[in-house]
């Protein structure tokens, strides 16, 4: 989950309306009367589980192998032309060090290769891990991106290899311990970020030696998407410092100090916090880039360890209920579709992003975790809405940013404008129009299909994954791998950007494969017996109560 394009500009614009925020916060919010989703409470321990707890899954080996083949093509191109650099440029058969030159694609591919059982690739990555020099880089370091990709990837590989996959590989204890050693080494270099007056980290760092850039603020997602990985590191090592650092920063997000500005709706927050005061600097946000994964991790931390993170659950419920009450929106031309609006203060803005399409899966996970058909139902509606953004384009792939007119807000108001003339026909048919047609090999729609399938067992979600996979394979496959696209609503995607993202390995390939794969300990469970939780980069992290407490994997 990353801040990019439209959401970045939207959030940046919010910093110029401080006075308006304070005034608007005192006004009564405009409740979305056309929705009737009830709020939900966690189920009691002895409550009978509803029927959706026992779905029947239908693995499809042929399709799973097709996804594995795409993974191998991507890896072989990367390994030949880019390894050990960060990312492949598949058209020019070259590389780019966009993530500090530590081999981001290799680390991001590690957990996927393990889940797929790709032994040759696993061996190549495992041999490389001890050689990464996390003490040095010539480029600026993002605490957020480094945590979710590198730290998350290392912890996940360690959890898998010391847990359910241990009987299937011949690696020595020394080999696997080097993975955790590298995770500690990296975290020890990153932890200088938290040395601020509040403990809210500076996201921008330099190494050699580790030091802060000197930022004055940090974003909701970049500050609030660290707690799973840093807590897991403490649980595995027995060293509490990592969890303490991330959880101290999180307190400013769980308990905003200036809610009149920073919490326009209960549980829904602004996007930027001051590092010196801990105060929110704006009241703009959404479930899209820059804020998204903060909400994602609230329910995932409760799933990770309910005994320690019940407050995170409560804050997720508050955010989810407010989203249902205030943000749900339906296009005028397609009222059957459901999207979540963005907000600036208490004014809604009817656009969304590919990044925000993770929200359907997150609501589904919340519904399963809290035994709430209401959250599950909204999640499935959001999944269907995001599918429409795929089926509505020329390539069958969803755009980076899209917009619609809400069917209850005043038409043609400044925050509810109609489509441009050249997109009126598309809007009348599809229920949205494209404002940024790029596709950056993003996973969020397929990710939410995966959660929908695991919650229901309905084969239609497998079909939706397959149609998306075929569309991406047909348009993004080029040269030695797969490339991002210029415009999904133009023939052949408008051309290639010549860039294969590292999260293509970690997320798109993993979720597409898991929908067709056999049962395994890392699969999301519709019941209450999840053994793993996926970080925002789709690296499966073993939930607390595993090896770190009980001395061995509990199969």
Image (tube, helix red, strand yellow):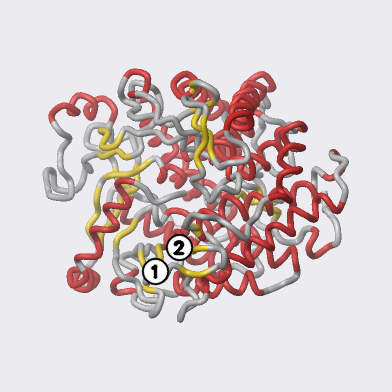
Helix, strand or loop status at disc 1: loop
Q: Are marks 2 and 1 in contact (CB under 8 Å)?
A: yes
Helix, strand or loop status at disc 2: strand
For label 2, the residue is 204
Question: Could you tell which of marks 2 and 1 lies nearer the N-terminus?
Answer: 2
For label 1, the residue is 215
Q: Residue at x 88, y 41 (%)?
A: 170
Q: Residue at x 48, y 50 (%)?
A: 375
x%, y% of residue 451? Answer: 56, 40
CA–CA distance in space, label 2 to label 1: 7 Å
Asked if residue 448 shows in the view, the reply is no
Task: Give the quadrant of residue 231.
Answer: bottom right
Q: Is residue 319 left or right of residue 154?
A: left
Front residue of 88/446: it is: 88
Front residue of 334/546: it is: 546
Front residue of 130/171: it is: 130
């Amino acid at each position: 989950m990353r801040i990019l394009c439209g959401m970045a500009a939207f959030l940046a614009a919010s910093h110029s309306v401080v006075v308006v925020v304070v005034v608007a916060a005192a006004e009564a919010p405009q409740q979305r009367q056309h929705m009737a989703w009830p709020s939900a409470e966690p189920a009691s321990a002895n409550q009978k589980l509803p029927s959706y707890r026992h779905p029947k899954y239908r693995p499809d080996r042929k399709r799973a192998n097709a996804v594995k083949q795409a993974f191998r093509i991507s890896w072989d191109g990367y390994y030949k032309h880019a390894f050990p650099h960060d990312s492949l440029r598949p058209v020019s058969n070259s590389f780019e060090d966009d993530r500090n030159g530590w081999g981001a694609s290799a680390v991001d591919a590690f957990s996927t290769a393990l889940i797929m059982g790709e032994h040759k690739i696993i061996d190549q990555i495992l041999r490389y891990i001890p050689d990464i020099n996390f003490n040095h880089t010539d480029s600026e370091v993002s605490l957020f991106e480094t945590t979710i990709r590198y730290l998350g990837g290392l912890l996940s590989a360690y959890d898998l290899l010391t847990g359910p996959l241990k009987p299937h590989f011949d690696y020595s204890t020394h080999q696997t311990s080097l993975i955790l050693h590298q995770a500690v080494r990296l975290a020890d270099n990153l932890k200088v970020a938290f040395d601020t007056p509040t403990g809210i980290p500076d996201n921008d760092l330099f190494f050699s030696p580790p030091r802060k850039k000197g930022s004055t603020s940090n974003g909701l997602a970049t500050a609030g998407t660290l707690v799973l990985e840093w807590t897991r590191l403490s649980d595995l090592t027995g060293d509490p410092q990592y969890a303490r650092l991330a959880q101290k920063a999180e307190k400013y997000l769980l308990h905003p100090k200036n809610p009149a500005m920073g919490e326009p709706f209960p549980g829904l927050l602004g996007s930027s916090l001051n590092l010196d005061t801990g105060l929110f600097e704006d009241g703009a946000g959404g479930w899209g880039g820059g804020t998204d994964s903060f909400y994602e991790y609230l329910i995932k931390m409760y799933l990770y360890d309910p005994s320690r993170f019940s407050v995170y659950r409560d804050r997720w419920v508050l955010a989810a209920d407010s989203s249902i009450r205030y943000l749900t929106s339906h296009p005028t031309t397609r009222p059957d579709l459901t999207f979540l609006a963005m907000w600036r203060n208490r004014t809604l803005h009817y656009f969304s992003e590919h990044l925000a399409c993770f929200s359907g899966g997150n609501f589904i996970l919340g519904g399963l975790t809290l035994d709430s058909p209401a959250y599950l139902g909204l999640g499935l509606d959001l999944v269907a809405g995001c599918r429409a953004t795929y089926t509505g384009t020329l390539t069958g792939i969803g755009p980076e940013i899209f917009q619609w007119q809400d069917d209850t807000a005043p038409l043609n108001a400044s925050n509810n404008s109609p489509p441009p003339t050249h997109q009126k026909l598309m809007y009348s048919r599809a229920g949205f129009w494209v404002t940024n047609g790029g596709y950056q090999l993003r996973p969020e729609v397929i990710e939410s299909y995966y959660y929908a399938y695991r919650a229901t067992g309905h084969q239609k979600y497998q079909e939706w994954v397959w149609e998306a996979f075929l569309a991406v394979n047909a348009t993004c496959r080029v040269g030695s791998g797969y490339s991002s696209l210029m415009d999904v609503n133009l023939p052949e995607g408008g051309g290639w950007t010549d860039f294969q993202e590292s999260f293509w390995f970690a997320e798109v390939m993993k979720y597409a494969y898991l929908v067709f794969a056999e049962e395994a300990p890392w699969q999301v469970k519709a019941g209450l017996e999840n053994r793993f939780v996926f970080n925002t980069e789709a690296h499966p992290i073993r939930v607390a109560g595993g090896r770190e407490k009980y001395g061995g994997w509990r199969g």
